[in-house]
Image (cartoon, helix red, strand yellow):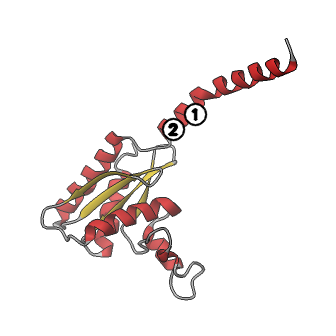
Amino acid sequence: MNLFKQMKIAIITVVLAFIPNLVNAQITNDITHEEALEVMLAAKKKAEADGVLVNIAVVDAGANLKIFIRMDESFLGSIDVAIKKAKTARYFNIDTGKLGELTQPGGIIYNIELSNGGLVTFPGGIPIKNKDGKIIGAIGVSGGTIEQDREIATFGAKSIIK
């Protein structure tokens, strides 16, 4: 067997050995649709209990919209804000309110909200972690006060950690 053929077999063997790990990594590092639904429903239940009308967006690990709900009579302008809060939280793996502290005039990342097609740097976006502490997505809530949005988003994000 020539050297080229041996190298080709060795490369194929290595790749095949890693396929199960790649599949498992993708499954465990991205929010499932069941988890996204659970997060959204928990947040909705919290908003209803608090008497707050909000929009709720959940994005996956790639910051792609996974699930969204606009509660009846919630603000139309909050649709985009909820989605951008979720994306911002995932882009930077941080509570959007904490990110906002860094974006103030004189802050180390002042004006970053102008990047990525528009970010939201006030509370209401929270990364979602799995039971192993890995970020698998994010939730964005908009329509209440920023304190209510953050509380509802945090409640939803924590709902899948068991």
Secondary structure beneath label 2: helix
Identify residue for label 2: 26
Identify residue for label 1: 22
Looking at the rendered structure, the kind of residue marked 1 is Leu
The residue sitting at the bottom extreme is 105
The residue sitting at the left extreme is 73
Q: Quarter of the image containing the C terminus?
A: top left
- Picture layout, residue 43 above or below residue 96: above
Q: Which residue is found at the position 33% from the left and 47% from the top?
A: 36
Residue 135: image location, x then y, percent = 49, 51
The reply to whether the C-beta atoms of the residues labelled 1 and 2 are less than 8 Å apart is yes
Residue 7: image location, x then y, percent = 80, 23
Using the rendered view, name the quadrant where residue 53 is placed.
bottom left
Mark 1 Cα shell of 10 Å, populated few (<14), some (14-19), many (≥20): few
Q: Which residue is found at the position 66% from the left and 24% from the top?
A: 17
Q: Which residue is found at the position 40% from the left and 46% from the top?
A: 161
Residue 149: image location, x then y, percent = 30, 68
- Picture layout, residue 11 above or below residue 128: above
Using the rendered view, name the quadrant where residue 11 is placed.
top right
- Picture layout, residue 26 above or below residue 105: above
Looking at the rendered structure, the kind of residue marked 2 is Gln
